[in-house]
Image (cartoon, rainbow, N blue to C red):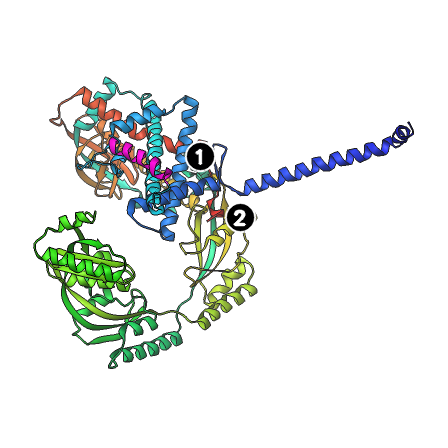
Amino acid sequence: MATLQKIRSKGKFLIAVVGLALFAFIAEEFVRSLSYSQSESRQRIGKVNGESINIQEFNDEVDEYVNVVKFSNGITSLTDDQMSMLRDQVWQTMVNNKIIEHEAEKLGLTVTDAELQDIIAKGSNPMLAQTPFRTQQGTFDANALKQFLTQYDEIMRSADIPGETKEQYANMYDYWKFVEKSIRQQTLLQKYQSLLSGALLSNPVAAQAHFDGRTNEADIVMAAVPYSSIKDDEIQVEDKDIKAKYEEMKEIFRTQAESRDIRYIDVKVEASKADKDALQTEMQAYAGELQAEGANPAKIVREAGSKVSFSPLPVSKKSLPSDIAAEIDSLGEGQQKGPFLTASDNTLNIVRLISKVTLPDSVEIRQIAVPGTDVADAEKRADSIISVLQAGTAFDSIAKKFDQPAAKNWITSAQYENQTIDENNRIFLQTITTAATGAINKIVLPGQGVLVNQVTDRRNMVEKYNLAIIKRAIDFSKDTYGKAYSDIKSFLVANKTLEQIEAEAPKAGFNVQSRKGMSSAEHGVVGIHGTSEALRWVFNEDTKVGDVSPLYECGDNDHLLVAVLTGIHPKGYLSWDDEQVKTFLTDEVKKDKKAALIQEQMQGVKDMAAAAKLKGAVSDTIKHVTFASNTFVSKLGSSEPALSGAVSAAKKGDFKQGIKGKNGVYAFQVISTNKTGAKYDQKQEEQQLAQTNMRSLNLFTSELYQKADVVDKRYLFY
């Protein structure tokens, strides 16, 4: 009881303690939740219809595409430029698929597993013909696919299958799943398009109008007064005119994403005279070493740091850089040229022709990998195999005993020239390219094994050359780069605003340039490599108009870039007073006002003779005018759809004037009308009209894109 009384006496204190503990718990959960929310927000690469796209989701898609490209093309890596293009493709595909899936879900459209399997079974989808599962005729083979999928499960479960084989099957399986997914997405899109196309129906009236518009022709004489006949300074354009025109044409100024304008200085660091002189002296020394008796060309080329490696095998002219290939014919064996300048790739070059030989460009071979307990044992077996073959035993039968196919394969120069060739490859290639047709060779590859090889055919004998090539870029030195960096850095320290930079740059030898309408989807700033950091600065929410960026070292380590943000154009509509918009609208208003003046002059014109006498008028005869095609006016160098429409509504002998076109105002008279010999086929016309409507309908994707309110933040990650 005493204890209970003590607790009661401390009631208020305990309530306060418990309250603080509860608050601490809630606060901790709030902070944890806030931290997670911020972390998740930092991982968002974009949004479609309010749905966030996580960077990991996007990267998974990119990895999938990369593996497909590698598998399809038999390559092991992609360049930076190829990766940038592939990310663009993946992004656009993801966005389009999410938009269609969003619309399809509202309509209840799906692609069931049964539908997908039916498409695969029929095998008519073009994507299926691109898979490895094909018949000898090149058509898709559903049975081959089923066999592969069965083998895949068995191989991946087996502990006895080598890892390399499992990897090959895994790559093939991943490729197939990509194809399967793509067909499902493609089919859903086709369903949506079919649903939309059902909303547009052709009919007999529209079909007849379509036919008439194409087959009813007219010949006219016309007079045109071009807008250029009135000087611009005779026309007054006020802001109210531009605003009114802006409202009329507003939709063409709609933007899908925010864009920004910058002014920038780009310093391209180049070799100084001292750098060029030093390289010239160095190259002269290498030229002397190559000419010395007993010189080791491979060693000299390697030590010189040549951009073209020394090849231990003769190479064809087509594998050489164009500037080197151009010099070959002027050199005899043992002769060399250089150092000489190649301006196109900014290099100094030396080329020495060691020797030349005539060799086949293509060689067909078959071979047997000879087993053995060691190399010596394999060599003995190889000698026995060669003896049996030379005695007349069929190559295929010997190969079969060793459970090898011995299939014939062509090896071409293009497969190994310009590639790094190790000693084993040199031995192998030198043997097969110099052996006669039918020759049987024992090829010992140290550390790899022994081959019995037969050359079965040789084709396209060409000149090949043993060369020593030293190709060096005319690069700037560290001192030259350091001076360029110091100069621009000092300039920026002294000039901190756009006004100062623009005023002082010419005096310091810098050129201030403009780039308007930059998109965050670009792969860098003003096309310079390695400017992703600069792009992030340009589009950073904290970067304000007038801010000057840090100095970026970029390009191929040869550019120094600084930018000033000069304009921000939010997503939606460009404003009427944007510089480029205002210039465009001003030109359009001038055309309207000039057209009004010319139309006023034409009001009193009653015939072609009077129209032709108007100031600045040009006359011509135009044949075969139809409603279906825009009339080309050669005297003004433009197509005029308005003229086509006006002529099609006129009868023979009619005179019309005041037709406002894109480049002038027209008067015309119809001198004859006729109908082409085409015969009316209502069904055919309706089909053509339906196809035309469908092409127009395909523009629906841009409308859906706008509705989806797509947000693209890729620039934050790449």
Q: Of the numbered discs in the image, which one, if any, rests on residue 2?
A: none
Q: Position of residue 190 (x, y in %)?
A: 32, 28
Q: Identify the residue position indicated by label 1 in the image.
A: 247
Please tell me in which quadrant of the rendered image residue 216 appears.
top left
Amino acid type indicated by mark 2: Asn
Q: Residue at x 47, y 32 (%)?
A: 49
Which segment did they paint magenta?
A: 142-158
Q: Nearer the viewer, residue 684 or 501?
A: 684
Q: Nearer the viewer, residue 9 or 26?
A: 9
Q: Is residue 518 above or below residue 5?
A: below
| Quadrant location, the N terminus | top right
Q: Position of residue 392 (x, y in %)?
A: 7, 54
Residue 147 drawn in magenta = yes
Q: Identify the residue position indicated by label 2 in the image.
A: 540
Q: For the residue labelled by badge 1, is the local secondary structure a helix, a strand or a loop?
A: helix
> How many residues crowd mark 1 within 10 Å: few (<14), some (14–19), many (20+)?
few
Q: Nearer the viewer, residue 236 or 174?
A: 174
From where the camera sits, is residue 457 visible? no
Q: Is residue 582 above or below residue 701?
A: below
Marks 1 and 2, how far apart in space? 31 Å
Q: For the residue labelled by badge 2, is the local secondary structure a helix, a strand or a loop?
A: loop
Residue 685 drawn in magenta = no
